[in-house]
Image (spheres, helix red, strand yellow):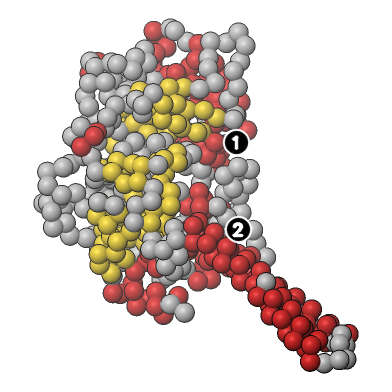
Amino acid sequence: LLVTTSSSSQQRRTRNMDPSWPPSTSFLETLQTTFAVITLTTLGIIFILLLQRLTNSRNGGGPPSVQSLYLYPIKSCAEIDVPSARVTPRGFQFDRIFQVVVPAVDCCNQDGADAADNASNDATVASDGDNDHDDDDQRNQSTTTIWTYCTPRNPAYQKLFHVRPSLVYDSTFLKLTSSHVEKRKNVRTSDFVLLKLNDNYENKKNGGVAGKKHDPNATSKDDIVVIPCMTAGSNGEEEDGDEKEEPQLLRDCGDNAAGWLQRATNITNCRLVNIGETFERFVKINPHQGEELPSNNYSNICNFPVSLADEAPYLLTSQTSLEDLNRRLLLRGKSPVEMRRFRPNIVVSGRELRPWEEDTWKRIRIGNVEFHVWQRCGRCVMTAIDRDSLERNGCGGEPLATLSTFREREGGQRNFGMHLIPVMKGDDDGNGPGNSLPEVFVGDKIEVLEYDENRRAEWSMSFSQ
């Protein structure tokens, strides 16, 4: 408008002074071109500002903050996206407190086709059987057999990714559904299963454990079946030098849950188990990372507890780092990947957060909760499995192949994400009432309290530019 007004005033002055008015055609064309250039430039600036505002909004708009929070109540199964989560020493409340197990001998022999046939028959028996003698036989077998956890690294177990948990009835029950389970007519079974929870899932009364008759309120020790189970650190997958764990005594969740899972996953003879009040397990040091355990200045804890997670209570990843990885994948002619390939608990983002900068952190505060940023997370073949189609790219597939080009350290660790250990102050051991636990929220700001100078120097050499 200013340009137009100025041009009009100039034209009036020129017309009064120059009898040769109107001006030449070339002058008008030049004026129109100038006006068009100014208009397009202005529109371009507006577009860039709007795009920057949209990007800042997506990435937190400034300093790092929590973009997403995830729980994985059943190890190796699907995630729950939550707006907030309570912090316990061994992980978010309800995170990785269940796992699916099979007899150790079955783990070695499981085959996709046989598993599908056998699981169909076993599911019918588990869902319909009311025979006490059969229950007793199964109970005796459970307590004498060593069981091992199921992981989608084995193709026969990959349908675990499609078992979707959800917290229902004010987080007092866990509901399981799957696209592979449909309601069957004339069969006394369901297309979902409910598991009872409580405030911290470790109360001896109403412990969320199904007894012999799948009674969620069983309190008698005679009603609770515990079975010896190998966990992530005792499953025979360790390399030389790795510290092995002893089997854990975990609670069996009953025939109803087992039968449903067999139908949902086609895993023969699988059972669902969970941690109980006697459960005790500690973080697992990865000898190939070379990270020492942090010191805890607020308590005398020398061993940091962990749930059924592989190595540590929490995993933090960065949206900015994922975007950098995806940019590299596209440059190699590969498809980008989703964050859920990496199964984090906490995803951070922010305009001021640079790719892979989370490597440099040593101690952070999220909201009002402090965490040690402890050990880098080496990634495995599970990241190469598409969560929807279940197609897998293999050990040399993506995103592992691209990570190997710039994120592989000595020892063969291809890292994405950082393991966290909470700094629990006072006498809080996570066994108090649920509402006394500290809590983190989506949107909480990330405050870096201390940097790891060695990792910072390593990051600066590789990514600071």
| Discs 1/2, front | 2
Q: Is residue 37 left or right of residue 99?
A: right
Question: x, y (%) of residue 439?
Answer: 28, 43
> Residue 461 falls in which quadrant of the image?
bottom left
In the drawing, what numbered circle is on residue 336? Answer: 2
Q: Is residue 18 left or right of residue 86?
A: right
**Which of these two is toward me, 202 or 356?**
356
**Which of these two is toward me, 147 or 218?**
218
Question: x, y (%) of residue 229?
Answer: 34, 35
Question: x, y (%) of residue 264?
Answer: 55, 28
Amino acid identity at mark 1: Gly
- Residue 14 against residue 338 in the figure, above or below: below
Q: Which residue is mark 1?
A: 112
In the drawing, what numbered circle is on residue 71? Answer: none
Q: Residue at x 26, y 62 (%)?
A: 363
Q: Secondary structure at mark 1?
A: helix
